[in-house]
Image (cartoon, rainbow, N blue to C red):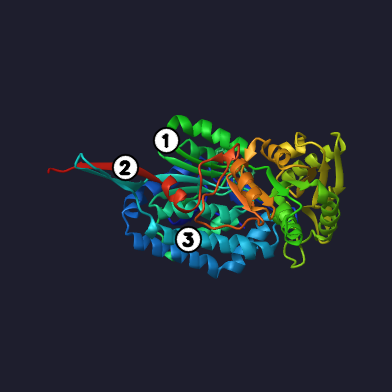
């Protein structure tokens, strides 16, 4: 099957007539082709967006909101088809796509459909000078949205929905590895009555199609989620052109467990925060620090639970973990596991191997893996692995664990398990992370600021932060006569 670009409301082949193979990672086979788009396709998408901008940016808020709600409804109505497409394209369990990815994509559109009508701007009265200032929040124009493969439709819509809600027109590129649900979104947008050219979806490689978006002189803002190295490259390209940038990048998140935590809840949640989506969520807690007094107990119970997890066909209800997204990615993850046998102070506690699933022998499966480490300075604790691999390490004091938690280049999220309120407050003050969960994980309220510090990114998404990013503030100062 061939998927196509979505430009000016039409489905089109790439101008160069070049195509790329699209893999089904749970079987390791090519099951379709996607456009290998280049600068010419991005230019066509840009032109369509530019033509649509005057109409869309001046459309009534209620109308914009209504269309975004319709898109949300269209996603919900196709829950089964979209979830199936996501599981096939990405390798994730179908149950996860049905429960998390697709409902969240619909929620993103509904949230920003509502937010568009609630967004307001400031007014400042300059008392004593007979003046009033008010701030207009104008859409930027044509903006670029680039997303990764781990939560394909979920993260794609998390960018597109606020960009559209704020009145911008969009040129978007999903990851070349997981293009299918973004393709299906085009059809939903047409049915919802989104005017032609307001959203344009270009498929292809980061180095060509993505590069053409970030270096386009008239695409004035880039919202990007992906790896830190790509984020740095985008910043280098876009900064001299004074583009607005929102960069959501990698993480190496600590999961800090104190002895006074609700043990059963912590254990069940830690299993999820370690291995959900095969550990391929930027928010997964990949460094588990456990207070020494419960370390051995936790280690025994956690390993037992990890061994019960079933790796298998994403389309089976009994699979807890599906396939990794690509062979290349699985090789990268396995190369980190191999370090456990090479660097001193590391011990493989469970997992570490490829898994061969009957009937799907070519798929990119691997065991959930737990490695004990003795220093936070080791490679496994410093570099993002982005797979089903976590490390385990004991700590003895709050100061020690805080120091280790912060001693990484990243600062996306942190999870804290404790029943001590003062400790919660102290640690929340000093943890270097944009998102801190206490006694829970991945509990998301879409109004809250989302993003990281240090090498985890620049800027925040979510709620009004996203609408602020996708608008340009313009202050109007009026002086009046006495
Ligand atoms: P990449 O950085 O490789 O790719 C992300 C997107 O950028 C893809 O669409 C990719 O296209 C594109 N891209 C690559 N090179 C360029 C370029 N030169 N110009 C423009 N676009 C380009 O990340 P992955 O897809 O591998 O995703 C995994 C990473 O994403 C992890 O590091 C993870 O932590 C991070 N992530 C961060 C999140 C956050 O919110 N902070 C959430 C989820 C993931 P192509 O696929 O064709 O290469």
Q: Which residue is mark 3?
A: 111
Q: Vertical placement of 447 versus 39: above or below?
A: below
Q: Residue furthest front?
A: 422
Q: Secondary structure under badge 3?
A: helix
Q: Secondary structure at mark 1?
A: loop
The foreground one among 480 and 175 is: 480
**Dot 1: few (<14), some (14–19), or many (≥20) neighbours within 10 Å?**
few
Q: Which residue is mark 2?
A: 474
* Residue beneath disc 1: 217
Residue 140 in sight in this render: no
Residue found at x 76% / y 43%: 333
Q: Secondary structure at mark 2?
A: strand
Q: Earlier in the sequence, mark 1 or mark 3?
A: 3
Give the Cα separation between the discs numbered 1 and 3. Answer: 31 Å
Real-space Cα separation, disc 1 to disc 2, in angstroms: 22 Å
Indicate the quadrant where residue 125 lies: top left
């Amino acid at each position: 099957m061939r998927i196509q670009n979505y430009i000016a409301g039409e489905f089109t082949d790439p101008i160069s007539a070049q195509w790329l193979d699209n893999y089904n990672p749970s079987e390791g086979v090519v099951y379709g082709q996607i456009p290998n788009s280049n600068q010419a396709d991005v230019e066509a998408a840009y032109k369509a967006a530019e033509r649509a901008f005057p109409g869309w940016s001046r459309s009534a808020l209620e109308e914009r909101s209504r269309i975004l709600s319709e898109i949300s409804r269209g996603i919900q109505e196709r829950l089964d088809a979209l979830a199936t497409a996501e599981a096939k394209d990405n390798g994730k369990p179908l149950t996860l796509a049905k429960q998390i990815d697709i409902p969240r994509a619909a929620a993103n559109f509904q949230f920003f459909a509502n937010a568009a009508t609630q967004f307001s701007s400031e007014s400042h009265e300059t008392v004593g000078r007979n003046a009033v200032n008010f701030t207009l929040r104008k859409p930027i124009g044509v903006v670029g949205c680039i997303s990764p493969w781990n939560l394909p439709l979920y993260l794609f819509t998390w960018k597109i929905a606020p960009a559209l809600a704020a009145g911008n027109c969009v040129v978007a590129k999903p990851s070349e590895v997981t293009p299918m649900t973004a393709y299906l979104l085009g059809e939903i947008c047409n049915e919802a009555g989104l005017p032609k050219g307001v959203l344009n979806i270009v498929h292809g490689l980061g180095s060509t199609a993505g590069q053409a978006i970030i270096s386009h002189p008239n695409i004035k803002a880039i919202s990007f989620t992906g790896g830190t190295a790509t984020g740095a490259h985008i910043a280098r390209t876009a900064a001299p052109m004074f583009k607005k940038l929102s960069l959501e990048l990698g993480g190496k998140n600590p999961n800090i467990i104190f002895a006074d935590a609700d043990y059963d809840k912590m254990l069940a949640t830690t299993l999820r925060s370690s291995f959900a989506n095969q550990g391929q969520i930027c928010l997964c807690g990949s460094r588990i620090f456990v207070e020494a007094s419960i370390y051995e107990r936790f280690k025994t119970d956690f390993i037992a639970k990890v061994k019960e997890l079933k790796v298998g066909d994403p389309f089976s209800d009994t699979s807890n973990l599906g396939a990794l997204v690509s062979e290349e990615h699985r090789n990268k993850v396995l190369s980190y596991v191999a370090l456990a046998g090479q660097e001193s102070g590391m011990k493989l506690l469970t997992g570490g191997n490829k898994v061969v699933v009957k009937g799907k022998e070519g798929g990119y499966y691997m065991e959930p893996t737990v490695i004990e480490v003795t220093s936070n300075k080791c490679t496994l604790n410093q570099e993002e692995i982005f797979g089903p691999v976590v490390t385990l390490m004991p700590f003895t004091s709050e100061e020690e664990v805080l120091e280790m938690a912060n001693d990484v280049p990243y600062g996306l999220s942190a999870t804290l398990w404790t029943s001590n309120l003062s400790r919660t407050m102290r640690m929340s003050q000093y943890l270097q992370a944009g998102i801190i969960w206490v006694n829970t994980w991945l509990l998301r309220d879409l109004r809250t600021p989302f993003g990281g510090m240090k090498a985890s990114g620049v800027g925040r998404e979510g709620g009004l932060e996203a609408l602020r990013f996708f608008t340009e503030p313009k202050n109007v100062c009026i002086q009046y006569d006495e």
